[in-house]
Image (tube, rainbow, N blue to C red):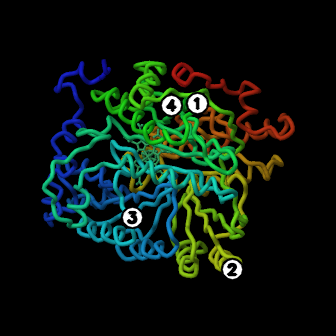
């Protein structure tokens, strides 16, 4: 008999989010009516949540909240739109349209690369929403299923191609993304004005009420864990023979968010459930997603992600159910190992004798400001480049498939627009989430504080002679952990305005969760603690010992082995 968590709960116990999905007529709601309402820039009632399934979030500029409130104006509502870009690949020529839209139609004029290999526009007024969707559609893109309770943008190792494996893996990322998309035609009807087709909508995989919570998928090519697979719900680790992918090790149940003070919430690293051969990939993906769909908790959203489903039912039962649904038996995990997560900056030659140039973009924010003219520089590169841009999970960009003939010219542009400035290893491996002013959940600054914070930490590292070393440093403005701070060697997580929890002890390859070292402290206090820790590390480390490994070996912090018990203890 099929186990179904939700068979034992009554309609009344379901969360409001479940009611919204159920009553939405397959994600349509009354969005069309709201689009006609010119009195407000916002969406009303259920539509506020439903537009997320179509890749948009309603936000307001938090820097302006008090001022607008005093003037008795409604908050400055505008939408953030997140594009779907499996594997992060976009033709350079298409980039020009993205660049143009950001300049002419958004309040901030920026493009924000995300750490899930796509980009966001911030500040699109409601009246411009159809324009953005039509622009994306015209260049073969969409923002479908990049938010809310569905399978999100599928990640794929993006480091420059060394073999044909990368191309195969990227094709699988696209296949899985398309396979798990919602089937409803709501997106096309509402945003692209396509005629309503009179059919009965069906969602054969996601179901009428979609998934209990967001769901994240990666494909990763060892030895580079640049996608941070352990933070994701469903992961396919490439196993290859003779330059061909023959199958995948499958890992499930990763996730990093928690709620301050709520011990029923905890981060968790994805765990291995077995190896599958390549022809079974889509059946396994479907089985994993549908088990989570049917067993995931729909009465409490803080307990609804795959990791909690696995905890609630047990890994063995979860795995068995996947095998039954896919009619496949997992084989034992095949050998694989990871050596790093960072991007490899600069030029690399690919298997076709073309070149890839990885460029560092601080916080993934593409804009023109003072000495940083990233936006114009990238647009100039795009205008002469025949190949692709590849967005990395570290919020950087790779100019890929550059012919020998274009190499010098692209380098010249990159240099003159500050895109190849020399930066420290610390900065290269730093990352922050968006946070203020657009994120409604932000508790402390992240993106806007990172650059100066790195500079101060660089000075400390210089003082103690470790300035050439790498430390993975990440900042999240709240415990949702979008900056993946809990997988950093040094992680900050916002507690309240200008105060953070300091976490240490993650490792370089991303399979150890960091642990709280100090709680609720200011930036100044954090730097004092880090100064002491870096001095000790510099004096007492073993040869080539990483900062994260050092603080564990010296028992400065307890290693997290089982996060369910160890994260809070
Ligand atoms: Fe995130 C919510 C930004 C990656 C965990 N995240 C948000 C929202 C949409 C706030 C909201 O719900 O209103 C943020 C929008 C800010 C803005 O103004 O743009 C936001 N998340 C981001 C991005 C842009 C951070 C970045 O700087 O790159 C990333 C977009 C990825 C993408 O392209 O899809 C982003 N978010 C992540 C990650 C990292 C990852 O996936 O590798 C995590 C932690 C991993 C995980 O899922 O456990 C993450 N975001 C969350 C959560 C907590 C989810 C949970 O399981 O409880 C929320 C809040 C929620 O969903 O309720 C959230
Ligand atoms: Fe917003 Fe928090 Fe995510 Fe940062 S971690 S983008 S503050 S939800």
Residue under label 2, please give it: 412
Residue depicted at 32% across the width and 54% down the height: 57
Labels 2, 1: front one = 2
Foreground pick, 452 / 550: 550
Quadrant that contains the N terminus: top left
Labels 2, 3: front one = 3
SS class of the residue under badge 4?
loop
Q: Quadrant of residue 351?
A: bottom right
Left or right, residue 540 beside residue 317: right
Left or right, residue 355 beside residue 158: right
Q: CA distance from mark 2 to mark 1?
A: 44 Å
Q: CA distance from mark 4 to mark 2?
A: 44 Å
SS class of the residue under badge 1?
strand
Mark with earlier residue (2, 1):
2
Q: Are marks 4 and 1 in contact (CB under 8 Å)?
A: no
Q: Position of residue 175 (x, y in %)?
A: 45, 51
Left or right, residue 494 beside residue 392: left
Mark with earlier residue (4, 2):
4
Q: CA distance from mark 1 to mark 3?
A: 41 Å
Residue under label 4, please give it: 267
Circle 1 Cα neighbour tier, 10 Å, few/some/many (<14 / 14–19 / ≥20): many
Residue depicted at 38% across the width and 62% down the height: 122
Foreground pick, 313 / 479: 313
Q: Position of residue 489 (x, y in %)?
A: 66, 39
In the image, residue 306 sits, relative to residue 314, either above or below, namely below
SS class of the residue under badge 3?
loop
Mark with earlier residue (3, 4):
3
Q: Quadrant of residue 13?
A: top left
Q: Are marks 3 and 4 in contact (CB under 8 Å)?
A: no
Residue under label 3, please give it: 141
Outermost residue toward the right? Answer: 543
Residue under label 1, please give it: 516
């Amino acid at each position: 008999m099929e186990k179904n968590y939700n068979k034992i709960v009554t309609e009344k116990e379901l969360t409001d989010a479940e009611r919204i999905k159920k009553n939405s007529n397959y994600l349509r709601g009354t969005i069309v009516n709201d689009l006609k309402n010119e009195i407000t820039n916002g969406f009303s009632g259920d539509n506020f949540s439903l537009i997320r399934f179509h890749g948009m979030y309603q936000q307001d500029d938090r820097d302006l909240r008090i001022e607008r409130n005093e003037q008795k104006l409604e908050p400055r509502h505008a939408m953030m739109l997140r594009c779907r870009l499996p594997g992060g690949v976009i033709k350079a020529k298409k980039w020009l349209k993205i660049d143009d839209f950001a300049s002419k139609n958004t309040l901030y004029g920026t493009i924000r690369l995300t750490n899930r290999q796509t980009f966001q526009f911030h500040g699109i007024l409601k009246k411009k929403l159809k324009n953005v969707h039509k622009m994306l559609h015209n260049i073969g893109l969409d923002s479908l299923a990049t938010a809310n309770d569905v399978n999100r943008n599928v990640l794929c190792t993006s480091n420059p191609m060394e073999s044909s494996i990368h191309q195969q893996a990227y094709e699988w990322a696209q296949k899985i993304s398309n396979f798990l998309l919602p089937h409803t035609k709501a997106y096309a009807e509402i945003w692209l004005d396509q005629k309503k087709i009179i059919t009965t909508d069906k969602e054969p995989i996601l179901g009428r009420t979609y998934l209990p919570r967001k769901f994240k998928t990666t494909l990763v090519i060892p030895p580079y864990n640049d996608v941070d697979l352990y933070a994701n719900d469903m992961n396919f680790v490439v196993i290859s023979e003779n330059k061909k992918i023959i199958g995948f090790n499958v890992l499930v149940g990763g996730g990093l968010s928690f709620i301050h003070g709520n011990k029923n919430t905890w981060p968790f690293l994805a765990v291995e459930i077995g190896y599958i051969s390549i022809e079974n990939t889509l059946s396994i993906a479907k089985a994993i997603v549908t088990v989570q769909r049917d067993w995931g908790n729909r009465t409490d959203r803080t307990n609804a992600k795959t990791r909690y489903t696995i905890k609630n039912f047990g890994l063995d039962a979860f795995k068995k159910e996947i095998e039954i649904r896919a009619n496949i038996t997992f084989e034992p995990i095949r050998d694989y190992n990871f050596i790093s997560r960072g991007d490899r900056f600069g030029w690399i030659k690919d298997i076709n004798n073309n070149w890839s140039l990885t460029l560092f973009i601080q916080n993934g924010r593409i804009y023109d400001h003072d000495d940083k003219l990233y936006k114009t520089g990238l647009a100039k590169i795009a205008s002469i480049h025949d190949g692709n841009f590849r967005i990395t999970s570290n919020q950087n960009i790779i100019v890929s498939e550059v012919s020998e003939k274009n190499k010098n010219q692209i380098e010249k542009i990159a240099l003159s627009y500050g895109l190849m400035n020399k930066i420290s290893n610390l900065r290269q491996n730093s990352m922050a989430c968006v946070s203020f002013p657009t994120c409604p959940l932000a508790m402390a600054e992240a993106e806007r504080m990172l650059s100066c914070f790195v500079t101060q930490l660089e000075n400390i590292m210089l003082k103690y002679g470790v300035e050439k070393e790498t430390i993975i440093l990440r900042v999240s403005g709240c415990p949702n952990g979008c900056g993946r701070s809990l997988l950093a060697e040094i992680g900050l997580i916002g507690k309240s305005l200008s105060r953070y929890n300091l976490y240490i002890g993650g490792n370089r390859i991303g399979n150890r969760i960091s642990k709280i070292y100090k709680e609720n402290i200011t930036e100044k206090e954090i730097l004092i603690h880090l100064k002491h820790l870096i001095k000790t590390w510099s004096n007492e480390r073993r040869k080539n010992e990483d900062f994260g490994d050092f603080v564990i070996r010296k028992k400065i912090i307890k290693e997290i082995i089982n996060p369910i018990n160890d994260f809070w203890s």
